[in-house]
Image: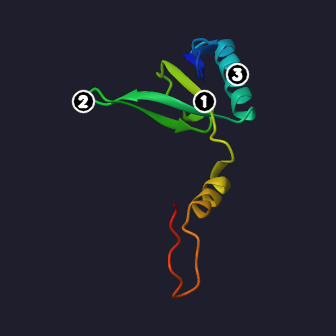
Amino acid sequence: MKLLRVKPGHGEILLAEGDVEAPEQERELIEAFRRELDAGMWAAVPTERRDGRREAELVKSFAEVPRDAERVIFFPRAAGGAHSAHACTHAWAAPSRPAGAAPRTLS
């Protein structure tokens, strides 16, 4: 199994590699996995559907990673998280205006 970090402009960076069936290597993979999550990264296991489409399943712990997974990809969380997404929705909402007021236009 390979643990990779996606770095924009650089592609995938190898963080750790090992055999999950070898106890010492599995411990190293688990430690590297935890370091990435502690650093605020998301983890996903790439999958491929029967129709050839590629997808990924988010995982929150090493125990959720299938034993036969070839790789786990780590990538940064979106800035601000869910709270900011809610605020962003409100920031893009149309400003309110008094009842009966004509809409403003840009000239």
Q: Secondary structure at mark 3?
A: helix
The residue identified by callout 1 is: 75
Front disc: 1 or 3: 1
Distance from Cα at disc 2 to Cα at disc 3:
33 Å
Q: Residue at x 60, y 19 (%)?
A: 3
Q: Dot 3, how many residues are within 10 Å of its Cα: few (below 14), some (14-19), or many (20+)? A: some
**Residue 83 is at least partly visible in this image:** yes
Colour pattern: rainbow
Q: Is residue 3 left or right of residue 38?
A: left
In the displayed structure, would residue 69 be above or below residue 89? above
The amino acid beneath tag 3 is: Ala
The residue identified by callout 2 is: 51
Asked where in the image residue 63 lies, by quadrant, the reply is top right
Label 2 close to label 3 by CB (< 8 Å): no
Q: What's the mark number on residue 32?
A: 3
Front disc: 2 or 1: 1
Between 8 and 5, the residue placed more toward the observer is 8
Q: Is residue 52 left or right of residue 9?
A: left
Count every numbered label the image shows and give the total: 3
- Where is residue 75 shown, x and y percent of the image? 60, 30
- Where is residue 83 shown, x and y percent of the image? 67, 56
Asked where in the image residue 92 lies, by quadrant, the reply is bottom right
Q: Secondary structure at mark 2?
A: loop
Q: Secondary structure at mark 1?
A: strand
